[in-house]
Image (cartoon, helix red, strand yellow):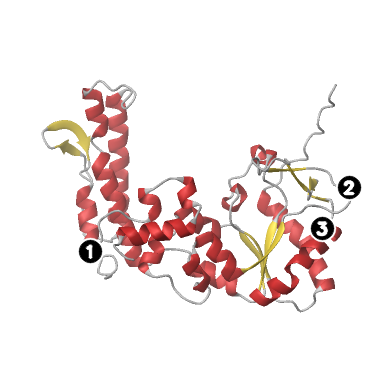
């Protein structure tokens, strides 16, 4: 008979675990072995804890005490592998009751990992990077320069919103050089002209589909419009709330937020294209003002595999722009 697994310790949010791992273990080890080494420590990137969305359910795979160390490129090449080995030897086996050892499945087709007790060095998740290289990997090749420069308008369109949230969310635990903090501030929110363009594109998407509930009902598509009257009413409520929020921003002249019929059809809609056109008229940035209202990459594509490979994203955005 297989013995039952021991119960997990009480849940601790992953960002709290990262902070404890840094303060109680990583920082003292670095201070003792590499005094004066400039670095940043953070918990950013993929993982539900970065956005504060982890829970006890998250603990069953790819979750636990972990963080990233960012060194200057030359320092990362010189010290990175040795630091990883040093931490494997010196990190405690547990932080706040949770293991620091990640056990892989052993199956190359199953890359997930699980926390497990360790007898000896831990297979930890304190990873060492140089910031430009990490940015290029996570956000695409142009991002390598964004520690010191602003993205262009079309660069912004190639940045999936999830990747931006992963970089600007989470927690910076220490930033000696200051470059990580500066890059996060630079990417914290869209420039005004990019923001206006993206909002116009989102209103355009709503305009293209807001009448479909009523049409599905007329066509007998119960899957497309279960309880069509109630669904149309709730959607119209949401449209009006979004329209009022738009007016409150003051980005355009106020527009009537009330629902109306879709041409001669009895469907309650906003005619959201009114908002798209009004916003589009405020876009004067040369790279954006004449672009079709397609938007950023994740406004027209939701494939995880596409959005997970920044080089592919960049090529797709350039193709849409008619660039080489």
Residue drawn at point x = 39 percent, y = 54 percent: 297
Position of 324 relative to 53 (above/below): below
Residue drawn at point x = 25 percent, y = 33 percent: 212
| Residue 154 x/y as whole percent | 36, 65
Q: Are marks 1 and 2 in contact (CB under 8 Å)?
A: no
Task: State which tag comes first along the sequence, 1 or 2.
Answer: 2
Q: What residue is disc 3 on?
A: 88
Q: Please tell me which residue lies in front, 279 or 110.
A: 110
Task: State which tag comes first along the sequence, 3 or 1.
Answer: 3
Q: Please tell me which residue lies in front, 299 or 104.
A: 104
Residue drawn at point x = 20 percent, y = 55 percent: 277
How crowded pointer 2 is (Cα within 10 Å; few <14, some 14-19, many 20+) is rated as few
Q: Tell me how far mark 3 sits from mark 2, CA to CA.
A: 12 Å
In the displayed orientation, state which residue is furthest to the left: 264
How crowded pointer 3 is (Cα within 10 Å; few <14, some 14-19, many 20+) is rated as many
| Residue 293 x/y as whole percent | 26, 55
How crowded pointer 1 is (Cα within 10 Å; few <14, some 14-19, many 20+) is rated as few
| Residue 160 x/y as whole percent | 45, 55
Q: Are marks 3 and 1 in contact (CB under 8 Å)?
A: no
Q: What residue is disc 2 on?
A: 119
Residue 290 - label: 1
Task: State which tag comes first along the sequence, 3 or 2.
Answer: 3
Q: How many marks?
A: 3
Residue 250, quarter of picture: bottom left
Q: Where is the N terminus found, in terms of image quarters?
A: top right
Q: Where is the C terminus found, in terms of image quarters?
A: bottom left
Residue drawn at point x = 28 percent, y = 49 percent: 203
User: For the residue labelled by badge 3, is the local secondary structure a helix, a strand or a loop?
Assistant: helix
Lateral position of residue 46 relative to residue 122, left or right:
left
């Amino acid at each position: 008979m297989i013995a039952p697994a021991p119960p997990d310790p009480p849940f601790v949010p992953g960002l709290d675990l990262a902070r404890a791992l840094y303060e109680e273990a990583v920082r003292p080890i670095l201070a003792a072995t590499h005094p004066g080494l400039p670095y940043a420590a953070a918990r950013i990137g993929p993982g539900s804890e970065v956005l504060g969305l982890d829970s006890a359910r998250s603990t069953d795979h790819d979750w636990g005490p972990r963080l990233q160390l960012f060194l200057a490129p030359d320092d990362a090449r010189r010290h990175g592998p040795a630091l990883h080995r040093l931490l494997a030897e010196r990190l405690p086996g547990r932080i706040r009751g949770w293991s620091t050892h990640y056990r892989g499945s052993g199956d190359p087709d199953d890359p997930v990992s699980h926390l497990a007790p360790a007898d000896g060095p831990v297979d930890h998740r304190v990873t060492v990077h140089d910031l430009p290289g990490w940015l290029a990997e996570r956000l695409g090749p142009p991002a390598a320069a964004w520690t010191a420069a602003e993205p262009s308008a079309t660069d912004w369109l190639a940045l999936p919103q999830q990747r931006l949230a992963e970089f600007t969310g989470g927690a910076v635990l220490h930033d000696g050089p200051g470059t990580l903090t500066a890059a996060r501030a630079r990417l914290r929110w869209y420039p005004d002209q990019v923001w206006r363009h993206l909002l116009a594109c989102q209103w355009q998407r709503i305009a293209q589909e807001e009448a479909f509930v009523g049409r599905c009902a007329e066509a007998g598509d119960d899957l497309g419009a279960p309880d069509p009257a109630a669904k149309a009413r709730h959607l119209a409520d949401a449209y009006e709330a979004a329209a009022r929020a738009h007016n409150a921003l003051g980005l355009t002249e106020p527009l009537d937020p009330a629902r109306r019929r879709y041409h001669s059809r009895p469907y309650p809609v906003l005619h959201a294209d009114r908002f798209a056109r009004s916003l589009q008229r405020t876009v004067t940035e040369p790279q954006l003002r004449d672009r079709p209202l397609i938007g950023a990459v994740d406004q027209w594509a939701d494939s995880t595999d596409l959005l997970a490979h920044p080089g592919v994203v960049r090529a797709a955005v350039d193709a849409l722009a008619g660039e080489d």
